[in-house]
Image: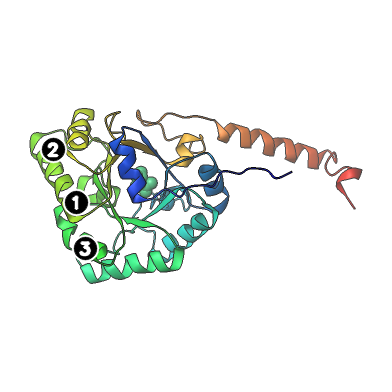
């Protein structure tokens, strides 16, 4: 008897645009390794971002600044090998694209060639326009990132909500239009007022993906480790935790330690 398995249709930039067109919200999550990416993909997430938040979550750095291009390529390759359906976007890390469009292009090409990812993401607006245009001219899809841009944390000095005043909000709207005009396929809006997200999302043809930016974005993204409760001390207001894996893992590992100490593990059936 043959089993019918429907073909998995790979998400593309075109499909993401169509989703926005028909009002279907886009789901996005981060992943940094093969095992997690396999689960995220199987759960039906549309975009997997290999975020430079790997610098915090995987390597324990305080900021996203230390992670290198080589390290991002390592994480991205592992994710790409796991994913069958989702569109895989990779962050260009700090120092690999700002202020030098030739270097930006080289960095983007290395990510695409060496990891097999589908697109790159860059933080910033008009100040990185040249880099965005140069990367797009090589046929590499680019996602923008406006609002709170963690690679500029030492300029802001804080991770609080951005674009609350008119000047910064107007600049963000102008940057969003500029990125769309350049040819970006989507824009992450991080930690900005919900009303501003609604305005930008209504004005743009390309999808916006929000994090801490309210329900008006065309899609939502979270850091996977926050959503599943592995980063137990990180509790921003925008975060909804869907599981407490920290506690589940702690209980399981305690149990294992007890079983080893008490000689319960391994038993006869668990040996050869
Ligand atoms: O690096 C990251 O995880 C991100 C998301 C928070 C959007 O850029």
Mark 1, residue position: 179
Q: Earlier in the sequence, mark 3 or mark 2?
A: 3
- The percent position of residue 4, horizontal first and vertical second, equals 63, 43
Q: Sort mark 1 into few (<14), some (14-19) or many (20+) by Cα contacts within 10 Å.
A: many
- Residue, x 21% and y 31% (percent of image)? 198
Nearer mark to the viewer, of 3 and 2: 3
| Observer able to see residue 63 | no
Q: CA distance from mark 3 to mark 2?
A: 23 Å
Q: Earlier in the sequence, mark 1 or mark 3?
A: 3
Quadrant of image for the N terminus: top right
Q: Decide if ligand 1 comes within 8 Å of the CB at mark 3.
A: no
Give the SS element for disc 1. helix
Q: Sort mark 3 into few (<14), some (14-19) or many (20+) by Cα contacts within 10 Å.
A: many
Q: Are marks 1 and 3 in contact (CB under 8 Å)?
A: no
Would residue 248 appear left or right of 229 to someone viewing this image?
right
Q: Decide if ligand 1 comes within 8 Å of the CB at mark 1.
A: no
Q: Tell me the number on the disc at residue 169.
A: 2
Location of residue 149 with respect to 236 vertically, above or below: below
- The percent position of residue 72, horizontal first and vertical second, equals 42, 60
Residue in the foreground of this view, choosing between 9 and 267: 9
Q: CA distance from mark 1 to mark 3?
A: 11 Å
Nearer mark to the viewer, of 1 and 3: 1
Q: Tell me the number on the disc at residue 131.
A: 3
Q: Are marks 1 and 2 in contact (CB under 8 Å)?
A: no
Give the SS element for disc 2. helix
Nearer mark to the viewer, of 1 and 2: 1
Residue in the foreground of this view, choosing between 269 and 250: 269
- The percent position of residue 58, horizontal first and vertical second, equals 48, 51
Would residue 138 appear left or right of 127 to someone viewing this image?
right
- The percent position of residue 141, horizontal first and vertical second, equals 31, 57
- Residue, x 89% and y 44% (percent of image)? 269
Q: Earlier in the sequence, mark 1 or mark 2?
A: 2
């Amino acid at each position: 008897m043959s089993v019918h398995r429907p073909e998995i249709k790979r998400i593309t930039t075109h499909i993401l645009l169509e989703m926005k067109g028909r009002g279907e919200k886009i789901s996005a999550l981060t992943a940094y390794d093969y095992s997690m990416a396999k689960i995220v993909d199987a759960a039906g997430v549309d975009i997997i971002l290999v975020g430079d938040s790997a610098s915090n979550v995987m390597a324990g750095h305080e900021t996203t600044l230390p992670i290198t291009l080589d390290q991002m390529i390592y994480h991205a390759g592992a994710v790409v090998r796991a994913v069958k359906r989702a569109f895989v976007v990779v962050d260009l890390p700090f120092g690999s694209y700002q202020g030098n469009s030739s270097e930006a292009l080289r960095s983007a090409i290395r990510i695409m060639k060496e990891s097999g990812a589908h697109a790159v993401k860059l933080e910033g607006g008009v100040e990185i326009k040249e880099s965005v245009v140069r990367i797009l001219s090589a046929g590499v899809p680019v996602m923008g990132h406006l609002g709170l841009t963690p690679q500029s944390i030492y300029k802001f000095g804080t991770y609080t909500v951005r674009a609350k005043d008119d000047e910064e909000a107007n600049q963000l709207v102008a940057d969003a239009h500029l990125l769309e005009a350049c040819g970006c396929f989507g824009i992450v809006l991080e930690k900005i007022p919900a009303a501003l997200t609604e305005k930008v999302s209504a004005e743009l043809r390309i999808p916006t993906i929000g994090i801490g930016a309210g329900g008006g974005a065309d899609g939502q993204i979270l850091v996977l480790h926050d959503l599943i409760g592995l980063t137990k001390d990180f509790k921003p207001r925008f975060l909804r935790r869907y599981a407490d894996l920290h506690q589940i893992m702690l209980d399981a590992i305690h149990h294992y330690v007890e079983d080893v100490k008490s000689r319960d593990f391994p038993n006869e059936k668990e040996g050869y």
